[in-house]
């Protein structure tokens, strides 16, 4: 079984995608935490022992609804806007129920990590957390050169070439992408391909 960990190992576009996701998550957590922090300060709660557990949970709950609302209305949170990311529904239009479902693990940082690791450790779109699979959503970059389904097939083909896995079928062999920029590769001669976007020979 090919997982996201297999694909991310030698794929720069996918690595850059997850770096953007992490930075966007941190920015959104800070934004969602500001009103919670102001309330804590105004109530003079301070850094008591229970607050160290209570604050990230309350901040996380605010972040869940902040992310769900922004993604439902704009397909992007503020963090995603700044990093050039957007949420995409894989089937029907994106509903509020789906945006809440895909964000529910953000109620606590530890749950987000588990959600991400389970998504990366199982077969499917390497850009999906586990709850993305459940909600049938994914996150793409605004500059991504190919659609989600084709993107997955192309990355799987690169993995087949690099680790000598079982040969993909004839339909899959039609699609390859550049490991540097994500552009589409074109055949130059036998065993030589060139990126139509950056010109890199591979």
Image: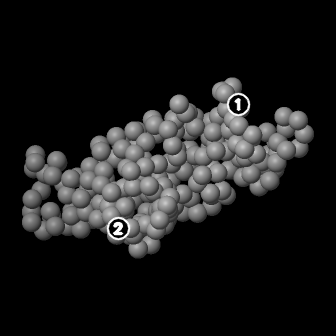
Q: Secondary structure at mark 1?
A: loop
Q: Nearer the viewer, mark 1 or mark 2?
A: 1
> Which quadrant: the C terminus?
top right
In the image, farthest residue toward the top? 164
Callout 2 crowding tier (Cα within 10 Å): few <14, some 14–19, many ≥20:
some
Q: How many marks?
A: 2
The x and y percentages for residue 130 are: 40, 45
Quarter assignment of residue 42:
bottom left
Q: Tell me: 188 left or right of 27.
A: right
Q: Which mark is residue 96?
A: 2
Callout 1 crowding tier (Cα within 10 Å): few <14, some 14–19, many ≥20:
few
Nearest the viewer among 19 and 124 is 124
Q: Is residue 93 visible?
A: yes
Q: Which mark is residue 167?
A: 1
Q: Which mark is residue 26?
A: none
Q: Is residue 32 visible?
A: no
Q: Residue at image x 64%, y 44%?
A: 153
Label pair 1/2, CB-CB below 8 angstroms: no
* Mark 1 and mark 2: Cα distance apart in space: 41 Å
């Amino acid at each position: 079984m090919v997982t996201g960990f297999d694909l991310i190992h030698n794929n720069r576009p996918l690595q850059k995608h997850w770096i953007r996701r992490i930075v966007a998550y941190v920015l959104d957590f800070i934004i969602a935490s500001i009103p919670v922090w102001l309330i804590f300060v105004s109530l003079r709660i301070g850094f008591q022992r229970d607050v160290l557990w209570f604050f990230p949970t309350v901040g996380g709950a605010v972040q869940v609804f902040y992310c769900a609302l922004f993604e439902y209305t704009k397909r992007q949170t503020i963090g995603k806007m700044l990093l050039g990311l957007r949420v995409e529904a894989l089937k029907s239009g994106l509903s509020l129920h789906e945006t809440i479902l895909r964000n529910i693990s953000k109620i606590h940082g530890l749950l987000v990590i588990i959600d991400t690791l389970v998504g990366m450790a199982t077969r499917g779109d390497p850009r999906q957390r586990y709850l993305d699979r459940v909600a049938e959503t994914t996150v793409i970059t605004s500059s991504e050169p190919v659609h989600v389904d084709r993107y997955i097939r192309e990355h799987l083909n690169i993995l087949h070439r690099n680790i000598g896995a079982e040969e993909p079928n004839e339909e899959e062999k039609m699609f390859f992408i550049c490991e540097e920029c994500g552009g589409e590769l074109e055949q130059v001669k036998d065993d030589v391909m060139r990126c139509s976007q950056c010109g890199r020979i591979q």
